[in-house]
Image: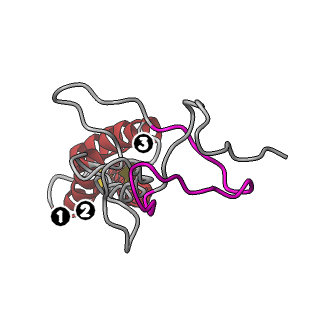
Amino acid sequence: MTQPPESGSDNTNEQPTPDSTGPGEEQQVPAATPQWPSPPPSGPGESVPGSAEAPGYAGQPGQTSQPGQSEYPAYPPYPPPPAYGPAPQTSNNAVAALVLSIVSWVFCPIIPAIIALVFASKARREILASNGWVTGTGLVTSAKIVAWINIGFWAAMTIVWIFILVIALISGAINTS
């Protein structure tokens, strides 16, 4: 156990405590209280963290800054929460495919349906390559179904008309002989 130095000794490591009574009198410090080294002196224009001049730091609550007394800096404030990125977008090609597949039922039936299938496959590749940032798989599926049903319907109608035409031609050829 270390004893505090006697008064009158030439120990240069002695530091007076803030509540000492006079310049010549020294107060004994209990051995259980550690004496921390003081921070190095700051140069001109520099500020010591924890001091009142330090930007962005504040002392402990309820303590005032005294000369020669170092304070621990307060924790910096929490950073703001991260900004959320943009919401996923619907593929324009998927929308165009669905619109063209619906238009193929109203106007020229086959050409818009084929173009809708091209846009649907293009949209599917775009959606898969985007890793979730582009959506619209439901639109692509709907466009393909509507376009294929339209193509199938008009193909069946064409086959029926050809069959009727062939029967009419055969029956007309039989009646004329």
In the depicted structure, whether residue 146 falls above or below residue 115: below
Q: Is residue 174 visible?
A: no
Dot 3: within a 10 Å radius of its alpha carbon, few (fewer than 14), some, or many (20 or more) residues? many
Could you tell me which secondary element the residue under label 2 belongs to?
Answer: helix
* Residue lying at the far right of the rendered structure: 1
* Magenta stretch bounds: 18-38
**Element marked by disc 1:** helix
For the residues marked 2 and 3, what is the alpha-carbon distance in whole angstroms? 18 Å
Dot 2: within a 10 Å radius of its alpha carbon, few (fewer than 14), some, or many (20 or more) residues? Answer: many
Measure how far apart labels 3 and 1 are at the Cα level: 25 Å
Could you tell me which residue is drawn at 35 percent across and 36 percent down? 122
**N-terminal label among 3 and 1:** 1
Determine which residue is flagged by label 3: 124
Q: Are marks 1 and 2 in contact (CB under 8 Å)?
A: yes
Quadrant assignment, res 6? top right
Between circles 3 and 1, the one closer to the viewer is: 3
**Where's residue 109, x and y in %?**
23, 53
Looking at the rendered structure, which numbered label has been put on residue 102?
Answer: 2
